[in-house]
Image: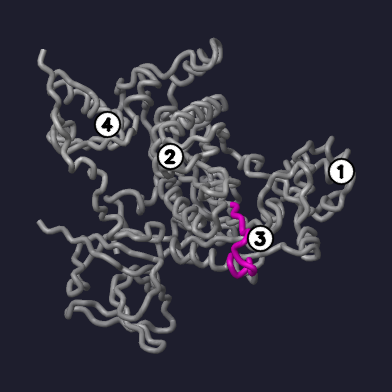
Amino acid sequence: MGCGGACDSSFEVIALIDCNSFYCSCEQVFRPDLLHRAVVVLSNNDGCVIARNREAKAIGIPMGAPYHQYEAALKQNNAAVFSANFPLYANFSNRIMNILNSFSDQVEVYSIDEAFISLDGHSTDVIAYCKVIRETVLKWTGIPVSIGIAPTKVLAKCANKLAKQFPESNGVFALTNTSLIDSALKHIDVDDIWGIARKQAQKLKKRHIHTAYEFKGWNNRALMLSLLSKTGVQLHDELNGIACIAFQLTPEPRKSIRSSRSFKPELSHVDDIAAALSLFTTRAMEKLRKQHSMTQMITVFIQSNPFKAHVPTVRKAQSFGLLTATNDTIVVAKYARQLLHHLHEPGIPIKKAGIILDELTSEDALQDSLFETANANPLMTVMDQINHRFGRDTIHVANHQRFLAKRRAPQWVSPQYTTKWEELRCV
Amino acid sequence: MKQTKLNANDVAKKLGVSLPKLVAPFFQSQTFTSEADMVAAILHLDKAFKNEKNVATISSLSEFFDLKLSNRPLPLYGSAVSCGFTSPAEDHVENQLSLDDYLVPNPDATFFVRASGDSMTGAGIHDGDLLIIDRSIEVKSNHIVLAVVDTEFTIKRMLKEDTQIILKPENKKFKDMVITSDQNFMVWGVVVHVIHHLK
């Protein structure tokens, strides 16, 4: 595949592995009675639907649906309703990412339930190889995944969508030749192209570009640049099979905060990486509080330099899920550090590390409700204000106190089957 | 004033709290003037780590990172530190045998469940025992498995003859279960170990 000057992706064949209705699938692993039943998972405080399985989609439950509006429909269809159990989901995510690491030495964890892997040099029959990956993840963890294979990330996203759409693909779909790519892209709306925002899609539609195929064939690069900016041009190149999007450039998954940096020189000692990570954590948490959010999922990742021949490539990530949302730097820093110690391998220089905060909920949503407790910490707000006014790090957390009010606990949290001795499944 | 070096682990044990691994080195490198001081410090940290309300332990972020969470690879020795020559055993303190290595060779595919009932006592599986299930193992006839029959979990020995599947209890009080073609049957995982408490 050709690659222009601006390209820095090292991949030739990419697979995007995406877990099917991930949270619902996690809930089903220890509940054989839920096989073929509709399952939904609700957000913090049981407010709205954040995950639905195929059966729940079939009864017409939309994403983000307020629970109380659909309570009757869910009951009528004998649906299982769960409050989010992020410790459980993080545990399954970590298992799956570890399994992917054994299939490829270049795994880029994109979100809690998605990862890109490089298939370079692994097998001549990439479809067969991905079927083995899919079977292994399903057998070892009970979680079904879909895999899209393509020369670029944007096309891999498209292929993944098709793998989910067509049952006959058995969860693996490859877009590896031009005629197949072209006919597939005709079925994909520009709205659904990864990285194209709704407003940008509207602009394209005004110019009679409705499908990914039409966008791919559009060759007015100057207009493209002015309408969609540089990212849009890159997406266009990716649709044409030219890989441009390196990991650093992947669009942030919706509703998450990422803070990371490359190290020069590379860092080997865990304490040095931890020091850097604590800085990233502080930054990410500032950003989190600035947008008045709280987090329930913390992911830490480390990467070695893949272009060094004599050291093994390391690209690893681990997540930690919280039952209650927090905006507290100290709490998150503690978990981030523990995750790092889990990931770190002595003697391998680390080129890049970072933290991703996921499953964000609004602070206000928590405070609005009379019976809730929030872990929202006013001290952190004051600290941010002072730091903003007098410069970063003017003050650190001094005299850390928690301000807890009463909170109505989520009602339908499943047991922490994989992370608590007291909550193991009885069989 | 005479300074003593106490063993933080022992003190923590007496107090009935577990000292997080991460802070152990902090205590190792600290000198406390009395046992009471050390007790106070341990209790304080224990509360902080359990995220108890209104614990004012951390006086600055840098202190938190630099001291309390520092994870220098200093193992906490089982004996009080004394002057003089070092024990040769100390070179190997980190070289512990790990039950994880022994029982869970493939952690990504391994799950723990709790046994209930007494249908498998003949196989050494008692009510309340911890079962270690490895989903990565290829199931064969005669394996003890965690199976799904219709919508229920069950632990049984699985016998496979041609196409017939029999789930065999290991207790004469129970009958064999022959799986019929209209039943939903699935092997969830193979039971590889039983952890039974002897009191």
Q: Of the residues tagged 2 and 3, which is closer to the observer?
A: 2
Magenta region: A116-130
Chain bearing tag 1 is A
The answer to whether dots 1 and 3 both sit on one chain is: yes
- Quadrant housing residue A120: bottom right
Point out the frontmost of discs 2 and 1: 2
Secondary element under disc 1, as helix, strand or loop, is helix
Considering only order in the chain, which callout, 1 or 2, is on the residue closer to the N terminus? 1
| Disc 4 residue type (three-letter) | Pro
> For numbered disc 2, what is the local secondary structure?
helix
**Quadrant that contains the N terminus of chain B:** top left
**For discs 4 and 2, the disc positioned in front in the rendered view:** 4
- How crowded pointer 3 is (Cα within 10 Å; few <14, some 14-19, many 20+) is rated as many
Residue B18 shows up from this direction = yes
Pick the residue in front: B61 or B154.
B61
Within 10 Å of the Cα at label 2, are there few (<14), some (14-19), or many (20+) other Cα atoms?
many
The dot on residue A149 is 3
Q: Which residue lies under the disc numbered 1?
A: A206
In this rendering, the answer to whether B129 lies above or below A358 is below
Give the image location of residue A59, x and y in percent: 58, 59
Q: Mark 4 highlights which residue?
A: B25
Q: CA distance from mark 4 to mark 2?
A: 18 Å
Q: Amino acid at mark 2?
A: Leu
Q: Please report the residue visible at 46 percent of the width from the left and 45 percent of the height from the top.
A: A318
Question: Toward the viewer: A61 or A332?
Answer: A332
Under mark 3, the amino acid is Ile
- Picture disc at residue A340: 2
Q: Chain of mark 4?
A: B
* Mark 4 residue crowding within 10 angstroms, few (<14) / some (14–19) / many (20+): many
Which of the two residues, B162 or A221, is positioned nearer the viewer here? Answer: A221
Q: Residue furthest top?
A: A390
Task: Pick whichever of labels 1 and 3 is earlier in the sequence.
Answer: 3
